Structures are given as structure tokens and as C-alpha cells.
Amino acid sequence: MSAPDRPEITVDAAEPPVADDLVTHSLDSGRRSAADFMNLVRLAVTTVFVGVYAWGHFGLDDPGFLATAPHLVVYWLLAILLWTFGKRSRVILGASRFAVPLIDIPLVTLIQITNIEGNDSPDAAAVFSLALFLFLTAMSSFSLRARHLIPTALVGIIATLVIYRAAQLSAVSLMTGPLLILMTAVMMSWLPRRQNALLREAALREARRNRLARYFSPGVAELIEDRDDPGEGESCEISVLFCDIRGFTSLSENLSAREVVRLLNEFHGHMVDEIFRYGGTLDKYLGDGLLAWFNAPVPQPDHAVRAVRCALAMVERLEVLNREREADGREPLRIGIGLHAGDAVVGNVGAAHRREFTAIGDTVNVASRLQSLTRDRATDILVSEAIQRRVLGCETEEIHDLEFAPAGSAEVRGRVEPVELFIPRTTGKKAIGD
């Protein structure tokens, strides 16, 4: 069947509670990953410096490296501990986001002051300290919390002033260094906000995708995913499919609760696969039955044909399932399917905090009634004249092997005129239920 044109679909602004949960989970997961990344960067940088100091001391025989080596080794060991235990404990991993102002900057300050005391060019060491503090301020932004940048910047400014005073730099340096750190913190505060926005957007898209998957086939869901969710109710013509397991009450009496759930999951799984294969929209599960329709929210000019083809495929799929059940010594299932076409109101219905995408109206009620009549007419599928007329009037090759056997008429509650009934069949095959 040809793909339908893309519809104009409006969005319901209210997000379900699960979306908020998914956003929170995504942000927490992103922050844990960022904290782990910061611990890895800290370990990598300190390891490099330990290697440089070892090469300077043992390779160049420079005694200047020996004075600061103990402080650097302590820093390196702390980096190893944070990285190691951060992977094993969420508490330690979460607390490690405070390591920049509480561990990194204080230890770097101690190392650099020690360097300045035995250095012939203290101003060079002081300038290098500023570069380190700018790097640490930028790294703090990976905590995905903008508010952490201000305390980090303040600690960095204080450390810079301490180092600059120890190096006896000019008043201009005492002003420009801290100002540069503050400007870096302000600029980098954009990064956590942007990353959080991206994580939230991704989480909401995932929640929307999961919600669409409840109702629509993968193809239809993909078609409308980048547009908007179906929104407030609107009247449109649909073909409604109502399916139910016959004799389910007596069948379930001999089953445990777990076996009943297993049976329903197995049955619904097979039936929904067929509904989605024909581009149908799943409205809801009704215990041992289900309600679906075609032609909304995506227009399908051949919606009646799709509905009939889907019903026939569901019966065939049930035959396959029953062969598996009989092979396992389980009782086969029988179903009744009612199809009717007409106008209905389709959209999000319910309270603001709990809405359901559904269809309401006489068309749905008639389809339910036809499903109930399948037992009396000794058939698995009954379709109304409205379905039959739309199928025969559809200009598509998909109907070339479809026929409809008259099945009389029936009075339907709420309707003045009786509904003419038909049993669908494919050419050269027995009618379903004969």
C-alpha cells in the first residue's frame, strides 16, 4: 500500500509524568558520565606531570623537581583513588564534582608556591599557574551544573592572588589574572546549560517516541515523530476494528494469574503486529480484547481496505498461534472481530495530568456490537455495509481478491436503521468462519 501524505498534526503541550522521570534520569546519567570523565582527565593530566617530573629529575638531573615531587605524588594518588572508587560508588562519583575547588586548585596552589620559592623566574611559574586555573575552571563546567562554576572561580581567584603575591607580581597582574578567571567562569557557565538543554530535549524525544510506539506502527510513528503528537480531538472518518477472545472467562478460570497474563501478552503481541503492519492505530487493550482504527492521525484513503486486510491477517495469525498452542497441549483460541466505518472524534481525551489518545462516537460502538454478533453468525469477522461500500469503491488493486458474503442485518442499539452485515473473504478461499 502506498504511503499516505503527511498530515498537519497539533501537539498536546502536556507531557506525561514519565517524561519528567526520563528527563531526570537522563540528566543524572549525563552528570555521572561527566563526573567520570573529569576524574579520568584529572588522572591523565597528573600522570603526565608525574612522568615529566620523573624525567626531569632522573633524566636531566635537575634537583628543582624534587621539592615539589611529594605534593605532585599526593595529587596523583588522590586522582587514582577518585577515578577508581568513583567507578564503584555513585556517592563518591557524585561528590567528586566538588574536587576541582576542594582538591585540584588547593594542591596546584601548593605545588606552584613551592616551585616559585626555588625558581629563578617566579613570574613564569605564576603565569603558568593562571593557565592551570583557567583549565580547571573550564573542566569544572563538565559537572553540568552552572552553579558550581562560581565557587570554583572564587577559589581560583583567591589561589591566583596568593601565587601572584608570592611571585611579587605587579598590581596590574593582580587585577587581570582574577578577572580572566571570572570571565572564563561566566563564559563556561553556558556549557552546562546547553548540555542540560540537549539532554532534556533528547529525553523528551525519547518519551515522545515511546508514547507514539504505544499507538502507532513504527512507520507511522516515524512519520509523525518529527512533527508533533496528535493533539486535541477532531472529527474524522475512520475504520474501526474491535477484536475480542471468545470464551475468555471460562478459559481463564483454569489458569493461574501468571498464565492469564502470559496468554494475553502472547495474543496481543501477535494481533498488534498485524495492526501495525497495516498502518493501524492501537487505541487500547480491553482485557482480552483490543480496539484499533485506521485513517487517523495519518490519512489513509484505503483505510477500509487496510482494516479488512488486517482482520483477515489477524485470523490467519491466530491459526499459526493455535498450532503452537496445540503443540504445547494448550487449548486453541477463537476470536471475534467487528469492523465499521464512519465519523468519530479522535484525539487526546482526559484530565490534564492523564490523557489518552482515543476515538469516541457511534462508529466505535457499532464496531463493538458487530464483534459481539460474530458468535451468533458463526464467523470470526463481521463488517458493516459502510466498510463493504468503501472497500468496493476504493480505486486500488488491493481489493482485486476481496469478496463479501451477505450475513443479514442486525438491530444496533442507538441506531434507527438496521446494519447490513457481511463476511469478508478472499477469492478462491473459504469465508472466514465457514
Image (tube, rainbow, N blue to C red):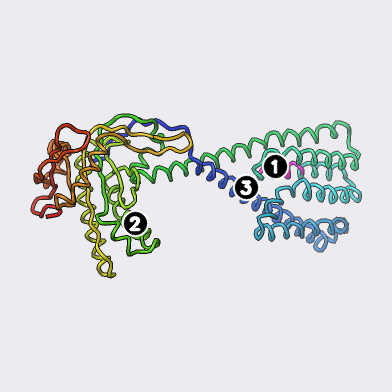
Q: Nearer the viewer, mark 2 or mark 1?
A: 2
- The residue nearer to you, when weighing 258 against 392, is 258
Q: Which residues are magenta?
A: 133-141
Whether residue 360 is visible, yes or no, is: yes
Amino acid tagged 2: Leu
Count residues near mark 3 (Cα–Cα under 10 Å), then give few for <14, some for 14-19, many for 20+: many
Query: Compared with residue 269, is residue 356 higher up or lower down, i.e. above or below?
Result: above
Real-space CA distance between mark 3 and mark 2, rounded to the nearest whole angstrom: 40 Å
136 magenta-colored: yes
Q: Identify the secondary structure beneath mark 3.
A: helix
Residue 97: x, y in percent?
A: 70, 48
The circle on residue 31 is: 3
Q: Which residue is mark 2?
A: 264
Amino acid tagged 1: Ala
Would residue 178 be found to the left or right of residue 378 on screen? right
Query: Compared with residue 75, is residue 160 higher up or lower down, i.e. above or below?
Result: above
User: Of label 2 and label 1, which has the lower sequence position?
Assistant: 1
Residue 131: x, y in percent?
A: 76, 42
- Main SS of residues in magenta: helix
313 magenta-colored: no
Q: Which residue is mark 1?
A: 138
Q: Identify the secondary structure beneath mark 1.
A: helix
Residue 396: x, y in percent?
A: 16, 39
